Image (tube, rainbow, N blue to C red):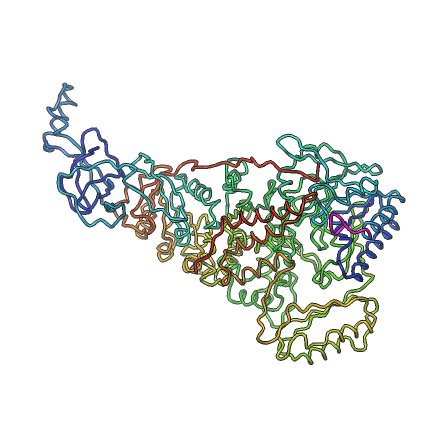
Amino acid sequence: MSKGLIVGGSFGNLFVREKTEENLEIGELLKADVKEGKVLFEVIDLEFGSQLNKQTLEMISGLKLENAQEFNIIDANLRLYTIAKLKPLTLICNDASTKTCKVLPKILSEIQQITKDDVVFPESDNVLFLGNLRSGSKVLDVDVVVDGSRAFAHHLLIAGTTGRGKSVFMMNLLWNSLDKDYCGMLVLDPHDEYFGRAKVGLKDHHASKDCLLYFTPKDPPVGALSLKIGIDLLQPSHFNGVIDWSPPQRQLLNSYYRVYRSDWVRAVVLEKALPFNFNEQTLAVVKRVLMNLLNLSAKEDTLICSGVFGLGSGKTIVEDVTNALSSGKTVVIDTSSLSGSTELLIGSIFANSILSSYRKKSFSELRKLPVVSVVLEEAPRVIGKEVLEKGSNVFASIAREGRKFKVGLVAITQLPSLIPKPILANLNTKIILGIELKPERQAVIESAAQDLSDNDRAIASLDRGEAIVTSCFVPFAVPLRIPFLAKRQHSSNTHKLDFGGLT
Amino acid sequence: MKFAHLADCHIGAYGRDVKLKDVNKKYFIKAVDIIIEEVVDFVLIAGDLFNTAVPGIDSVKLVVSQLKRLKDKGMPVYFIAGSHDFSPSGKTMLDVLEHADLGINVAKGDVVEDDRLKLKIVKDLKTGVGITGMVGKRGSLEKSFYHNLYTKHFNDFDGFKIFLFHSALNELKPKALANMESFPVSLLPKGFDYYAGGHVHIVDQASIDGYNIVFPGPIFPNTFYELETLKKGGFFIIEDGKSRFIELNEFPVHSFCIDCKNKAPSEVEEELKRLVSGKSFEDAIITLRLKGELISGRPSDINLNEIVSLFYDAGAYAVLKNTSALCSKGFQSINVDARDVVDVEKAVIEQHSEQNSFEDKTTKDIMKALSAEKLEGEKNLDYERRLFADVDNVLDDVVVKEE
């Protein structure tokens, strides 16, 4: 169906005269035939076009307003119209492959609406469904998919203003990847929203019993795990990026760890002796910080643990989580009742464990393992410029070199500009939702895998549930509609148990 | 109210090792002696009373005689089947004991709405305590039972309630048993005052999310590793809410671990002789673990028989030796951090993965198919056919690695 004709412009900015009543929209996808196949375009701007000059138009409007006369323009459709500005996205070759577009269609070529057969996303063994292809505000029956294994390893950024659908998108991502054995997901959930205690969530997925581990520090529902971490599993390096230790404090921690090994926290709190001298105040500060952060107290010569960190429990939690992730499971940790620092410390423990476990694997071993992705809400808290200026941490290490070891990040934020440019550029797949603030849009546009310099206005006008995906794993910056409830298959217990020996 | 909580008696364990089998039985008798002396109201056995579902006559005789002593003293015994003595057919020696009125199997119930299992609560006549429990199965397969448990009626029972279980719990697993199959504490039904655990051979008491969970460990350590780490057996006596661990260590365990790295067999022998020289090991159980790569000679060059004799001369009751991690130069050992046969198999398959033309999963599936046991009443021919059919099924989906 013809939507208009090309009437001029240049390669990156084609002018199309819109066919009357076609009502083109910003972000709409169109196509034009060329010898090699068809060029896919996106509408980046719309403006008025007219055969009448400005004075004439002003005169007509005056007559209408001041004299209230019935005034009709003869052949109005021919004289007044809309000009759409188009940007080429990709060339879809005759064999259905895609290439960077380097050709222009002929002038006065027809511009047509795309159909579901025009755009096909490359199939792979590790398909990850992101949403449906969107053309303006219309949703096409085309699944936008990427190779999940590669996309997760190369990190994802989900950026958008509050209320634009970041959590819904993340929920869909987790839902769609839960039963996939090519990826393990570690989710630090500060809002306790993904498991779905009180509403539909991952617990309702048909594979949740086998593929989901949910840890919570408060009243675990049936089948969930109590978040208890053995205090002897802590290492001084876990505090990197969580607590800004001074050099003497860091030395003190490391000394205690060298001398007392897994019992070092108890040794600090109970002020056990060290073979070297340290300033008493340094010990006092370190002790106070540890006691606050880990919710510890001391009575005579006994350490009392009152929070998530315990003495008698959680001795295998790090190994359990690491094993679950490396067998493709999803681990959700409810951190809603924990302080920000405690949450990051817990994330740091698990992220360190999985990264160091994968680092030790040989290339052939790594090939067999699923990619593991660490989901970080409010990502600038750990990979923000300010934080990293004080020292690196495991999340920054994952962003920089995790790809080599099949460990990736999913960074969620409304303020991408706070993430340093090199790290932002490393987050290869970007899911861009509506962003109102210009500096935040600029940050994602400048670091996108595809040229988005003309999409500034489109990003600002993205409605709730609309997104643009840029990635080296999609052929062009793909407009996306996030399904509110993705293709969700709820759990159903059809298997009848045999209670033999019990009845 | 006063009760005893035992688990993992494993009567009949240690197979052909008559001496250790005997110690195991002696510890069980000792436990019953102490329980009778303590005058408890009732006794809980949280699984694996026997080492198999159908134990030998000697084991049955011993257990029957001891349970009869408790019965005669008016101390009822409440038990559940564990991973060793459970049978899906219900045909276990525990069933015989129950029919002989020597104990009550509290892991019994009915299937009610939504195909859920409604466990019956047995009320102890003397104390009014409500007791119920869940069996343990190999590989923690009882987990699915917990997922399908009807629990509403538990709240209707007024008074002290005890839940017996025979499973490892994720939150309370010790580091050494990290690979053991387990499930979350939250799968246990809520609202009981005492959760009497078994299966995990550790001594532990923990309060987690309102669950008061107790693992007494075995009556007597069950493996070489357990003898090395636990050294003793025991059980709990709970009196008015306060627990007391009763140790059983009539035969003290002395463990020696010798690192033979860069040593000649003669040096190792000398070191072992020094260990025993001039010392008394009266009635002791000795564990000798030799590990590392000898600088010369072979492991068999170490005259361990002589060393064992020296320990016996010093009064030892039993001497156990473990040389699985001992090797000579040129003989490559496979290091396996494992506690049971399944772990060892898993690790060996993984370490030989490169030489194996099947995927590891296929190898494991074939081994699993071939390790299926003969069902009760199943004819040899049918059993054979079933095994072949299972292996065929695995091979139908086989994935052969590319060369």
List x then y, in percent, for residue A253: 57, 65
Q: Main secondary structure of the magenta part?
A: loop
Taking depth in this image into account, of A181 and A358 the one nearest to the observer is A181
Q: Determine which quarter of the picture holds residue B284.
A: bottom right
Name the residue: 61% across, 31% down. B114
Quadrant of the drawing holding the C terminus of chain A = top right
In the image: residue B101, left or right of residue A389:
right
List x then y, in percent, for residue B29: 84, 54
Taking depth in this image into account, of A155 and A343 the one nearest to the observer is A155
List x then y, in percent, for residue B181: 62, 51
**Magenta includes A92?**
no
The extreme front residue here reads: B381
**Magenta includes B54?**
yes
List x then y, in percent, for residue A99: 25, 50
- Numbered circles on residues, count: 0
In the image: residue A183, left or right of residue B341:
left
Taking depth in this image into account, of A207 and A11 the one nearest to the observer is A207
In the image: residue A73, left or right of residue A124:
left
Quadrant of the drawing holding the N terminus of chain A = top left
Name the residue: 80% across, 55% down. B246
In the image: residue B319, left or right of residue B326:
right
- What span is colored magenta in the figure? B49-57
